[in-house]
Amino acid sequence: MYCSAVPVSNGKIHTIALKSYRTSTYSDIHAGGVSKLISNGVKLTNEGELDLPAATYGPGNTKLLSDKDILWYAEIKIGTGEAEEVFLVDVDTGSSDLFIPGSMCEDNCQGHTKYDPSKSPTSKKTGKRFNLDFADKSSVRGSIYTDTVTVGTLTAEGQAIGVGEVYSKGLAKNIFSPDGLLGLGFAALSHMGTPPLMETLTRTKKIDHPMFGVRLDLARLNGDKGSTLINANADFVNKLYKDIEGASRVPNSLRWTLPCDKIPTVVLTIAGRPFSIPPENFTPGRVEEGSPMCFGGIVANVEANEPWIVGGVFLSTVYTVFDAEKPRIGFGALKDDYDAQA
């Protein structure tokens, strides 16, 4: 996976590469204005497809890893000079806050890299507190500081950081591999009430617009490519799999299995436009090595009124643009020769 941004100074796209230690998954994220991308050779075809030549990639790659294809995490740096520290953070498009464990954190922080504000000359305490609670019941609380944050070759001065003083058990190292979390979502999603990274980069004119794009490229590794799934209404999910010969629900689970040679092409229609998910993208992999059965890429929501969530199963088939300025999210079809170009 690559995270790219277009700085105003030279128009180059800066990339961050994400790799999966389980599945060898890659993607491209491009941050900056669409007009800037087009001026650098990115074209929109008459069919609405995105044409992204390899020449648009700039220097400054940083590896990111995937925790069993559920958490994508990146290496970032906080501070400047000799005080600069490296942290691994979960990259999340569904939130907009940045937090890491602080040097005073003892509860469930063992094994994580801890941030010591007293050692960074660019660190400033805001005097504000934060408390974040997540859907999986994990939580973090602490104090809000500002400091210089570097992601790839982009640097955000005065970026707000939640410095954790207490991590819940769900954030312990054996459960949550990264040190903290970096939210790339809209500012309205901030529970700390502070500007997110994309907004800071835009305000300081490091990029033209608070906009980034995602391109996932899933490659098989030992027959298991893995990815985040699509969560949908239970009635829809049940009907989908019951129409597939040999499909069955996993006991005491919301997941389904189906014969690997019976995986259909699934079509999602968004805003009147159909997007096809081919069989090779639809399944996260076989139930076990050598098994003729594969897991389905769509699972049921627990509650009937929960919204659909589209993960890598769908995102691997499109180019996704997150525009925090409008705000809006867009999907574009991929060109067949994208991989050859990139």
Image: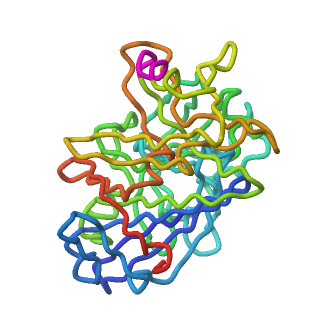
Q: Is residue 238 magenta?
A: yes
Nearer the observer, 95 or 18: 18
Q: Is residue 248 visible to us here?
A: yes
As drawn, is 239 to the left or to the right of 274? right
Q: Residue 80: x and y, percent? A: 55, 71
Percent position (x, y) of residue 105?
69, 38
Quarter of the image for residue 247 reads top right
Residue range highlighted in magenta: 233-239
Q: Residue at x 57, y 58 (%)?
A: 218
Q: Main secondary structure of the magenta part?
A: helix
Residue 75 showing in the rendered view: no
Percent x, y for residue 305? Answer: 36, 15
**With respect to residue 95, does 29 lie above or below?**
below
- The residue lying at 37 percent from left, 64 percent from top is 334
Measured along the vertical axis of the image, is residue 91 above or below residue 15? above
In the rendered image, residue 86, in percent from the top left (x then y), is placed at 64, 62
Residue 160 highlighted magenta (yes or no): no
Q: Quadrant of the N terminus?
A: bottom right
* Residue plotted at (67% across, 58% down): 220
Horizontally, residue 108 falls left or right of residue 331, namely right
**Residue at the location (53% across, 50% down)?**
281
Name above or below for residue 3 compared with residue 169.
Answer: below
180 to the left or right of 286? left
What colouring does the structure picture have? Answer: rainbow
